[in-house]
Image: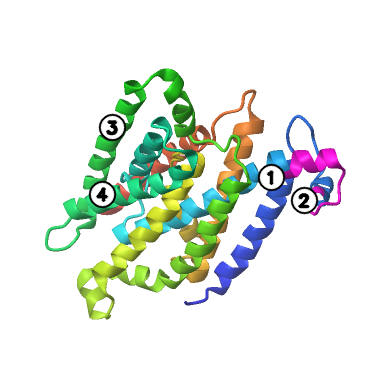
Amino acid sequence: MRVNLRALFLSLVAAGTLTLMVLWAVGLGTIDIPMIDVARAILGNADERTELVVRTLRLPRILAAALVGAALAISGTIFQGIARNPLVSPDIIGINSGATLFAMAAMILGIGTTSVPMAAFLGAMAASILIYVLSWKNGVSTNRMILVGIGIGAVIGAGTTYLTIRFPIEVVRPAIVWSMGSFYARNWDDVTLIALTVLALLPAGMVLMDWLQSLQYGDVLTRSLGVPLERTRLILIAVGCALSAVSVSIAGPIGFVALIVPHMARMIAGPPTSSGLLFTALLGANMLLLSDIVAQHALSVSLPVGIVTGAVGAPYFLFLLYRYNRRLIG
């Protein structure tokens, strides 16, 4: 685990910014609460009414947004490293689509809310394995993986649409609202699930960063370095799918965070290392929390956070695509 002092310093700055943003976000709403009172309520030193608003109604949503942003950023870093392409993310190549299909099926069929995270993980893994198998031809070509992933995502999207029209609207409506990407009515159980996932898989991702870096040199050189190539890919895919799937189960499919944040982190902190992955996670937490604040408070009407990330992320993706194409042509 190589240490990047610059990335560590940036991580401290990002952590401080995130702390202030959490205190600010919790205080926003119909009942405005000063940041100092928010801090007191979190520590249990405020009046009962303030503690109810802060600790029960608002804080779970804010923490869920930050943790989901961190999980998506880590997942995006992993999949971009596997594909050796900065235009790849789990929502672009169909991983999130698989998680969404299985999660919506669990909701619509009434299997139970506790089964949604497991259903999302199974869907993400099924999509990734299918992409991996269909991309295999004497090894995995990254370009073929991207094209296959986009195709698989389109097919899975058709299956999701079929679910929404196959069942009565009163049954499907909650799943449709969830599929827009939102942190509405998140509770401490959701926070616990995503927190445990990030705390377990962030260290795993940091340990795997050197192997992920070695994949950038191509399959032949990676094998010559003694790295078990296919096993490494499968482990990285499992970690990335778990992070993406739990994020989808908590907030629905939120686009472009996993694409944009790793790219921004590389621009600021350099190539991903173990400490660079920590900065990427904190940057993702800041970005998604800021997007949720904009969605809830900056406009005349509250919007699902997925609409805000899509409005910002789609133009940025087109810019990245334009610049990437120019580099290939040049």
Give x and y (percent) for residue 13: 65, 61
| Residue identifier under label 1 | 59
Distance of mark 2 from mark 4, alpha carbons?
44 Å
* Marks 4/1: CA–CA distance: 38 Å
Q: Quadrant of residue 183?
A: top right
Looking at the image, tell me whether mark 2 or mark 3 is earlier in sequence order: 2
Nearest-to-viewer mark from 2 and 4: 2
Determine the CA span between mark 1 and mark 3.
Answer: 35 Å
Picture residue at 44% right of the left edge, 72% below the top: 207
Question: Mark 4 — residue?
Answer: 146
Name the residue at the left extreme. Answer: 138
Q: Is residue 63 magenta?
A: no
The residue that mark 3 highlights is 159
Q: Say if mark 1 contacts mark 2, CB within 8 Å.
A: yes
The relative height of residue 25 versus residue 264 in the rendered view (above or below) is above
Mark 2 residue type:
Ile
Callout 2: few (<14), some (14-19), or many (20+) C-alpha neighbours within 10 Å? some
**Residue 297: percent from the left, percent from the top?**
66, 32
Q: Which of the 4 quarters of the picture holds residue 300?
A: top right
| Disc number placed over residue 154 in the picture, else none | none
What separation in Å lies between label 1 and label 2 (alpha carbons)? 8 Å
Q: Nearer the viewer, residue 217 or 56?
A: 56
Dot label at residue 42: 2
For the residue carrying disc 4, how many other residues have a C-alpha within 10 Å: few (<14), some (14-19), or many (20+)? many
Nearer mark to the viewer, of 3 and 4: 3
- The answer to the question of whether label 3 and label 4 lie on touching residues, with beta carbons closer than 8 A, is no
Question: Is residue 177 something one can see in this rendering?
Answer: yes
Q: Earlier in the sequence, mark 2 or mark 4?
A: 2
